[in-house]
């Protein structure tokens, strides 16, 4: 599926597209009783999302002109990362945030393809890719385990994962 798509770093002019895409995904999750990202619907994280775009940490996946997925990769821990993982004194990790795929593509393998793409194309001297997700989303937790991530435990109702880079 990704062979027909373009993956690129989001430019400043893509910032609102990313925000709107994530809000569409958040609404879909709410409509499907998935307890994740509801804060995005009320503007929570808009500034953080736009800041990540400006820092060139956010990627978009395009099929033609349509955004079909997005994700953010940061070398720096956010306040949230500190809360979930603790302070990364070794500074040996990248942090994956807001991996989102169009609902129509869920179950097609696009998510796994994106994780493979990240592993193959993100150049870094870091040792690990870390992420978190709500702990009661069994399907998403299984997805990360099935894609080679190691479960590190739970903090504040969020499962913590890492994968060797």
Image (spheres, rainbow, N blue to C red):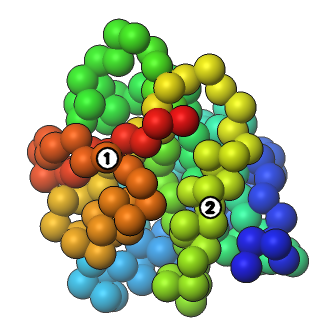
| Residue drawn at 84 percent across, 77 percent down | 4
> Which label number is shown at residue 103?
none
| Residue drawn at 41 percent across, 72 percent down | 26
What residue did someone put label 2 on? 114
In the picture provided, is 84 more to the left or to the right than 70? Answer: left
Which of the two marks, 1 or 2, is nearer to us in this view?
Answer: 1
In the picture provided, is 34 more to the left or to the right than 153? Answer: right
Query: In the picture shown, does residue 30 fall above or below 164?
Result: below
Closest to the observer: 71 or 89? 89
In the picture provided, is 159 more to the left or to the right than 100? Answer: left
Quarter the N terminus occupies: bottom right
Looking at the image, the residue that sits furthest to the top is 89
Find residue 163 and report its horizontal and vertical position in percent: 43, 42
Q: How many marks?
A: 2
Q: Secondary structure at mark 1?
A: strand
Q: Secondary structure at mark 2?
A: helix
Mark 1 vs 2: CB contact within 8 A = no
Find residue 116 and report its horizontal and vertical position in percent: 62, 56
Quarter the C terminus occupies: top right
Q: Residues within 10 Å of mark 1 (few under 14, many from 20)?
A: some
In the rendered image, is residue 25 in sight? Answer: yes
Query: In the picture shown, does residue 23 fall above or below 99?
Result: below
Question: Image quadrant of residue 73?
Answer: top right
State which tag comes first along the sequence, 1 or 2. 2
In the rendered image, is residue 37 in sight? Answer: no
| Residue drawn at 31 percent across, 88 percent down | 32
| Residue drawn at 33 percent across, 60 percent down | 145
Query: In the picture shown, does residue 59 fall above or below 79?
Result: below
Find residue 7 and report its horizontal and vertical position in percent: 78, 59
What residue did someone put label 1 on? 150
Query: In the picture shown, does residue 158 fall above or below 103?
Result: above
Find residue 150 and report its horizontal and vertical position in percent: 31, 46
């Amino acid at each position: 599926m990704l062979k027909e798509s373009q993956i690129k770093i989001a430019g400043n002019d893509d910032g609102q597209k990313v925000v709107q895409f994530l809000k569409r995904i958040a609404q879909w999750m709410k409509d499907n009783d998935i307890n994740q990202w509801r804060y995005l619907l009320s503007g929570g994280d808009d500034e953080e999302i736009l800041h990540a775009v400006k820092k060139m940490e956010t990627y978009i996946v395009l099929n033609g002109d349509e955004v079909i997925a997005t994700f953010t990769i940061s070398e720096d821990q956010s306040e949230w990362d500190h809360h979930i993982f603790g302070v990364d004194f070794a500074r040996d990790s990248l942090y994956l945030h807001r991996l989102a795929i169009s609902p129509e593509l869920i179950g097609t393998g696009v998510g796994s393809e994106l994780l493979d793409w990240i592993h193959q194309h993100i150049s870094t001297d870091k040792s690990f890719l870390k992420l978190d997700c709500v702990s009661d989303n069994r399907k998403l937790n299984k997805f990360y385990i099935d894609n080679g991530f190691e479960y590190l435990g739970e903090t504040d109702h969020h499962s913590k994962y890492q994968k060797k880079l």
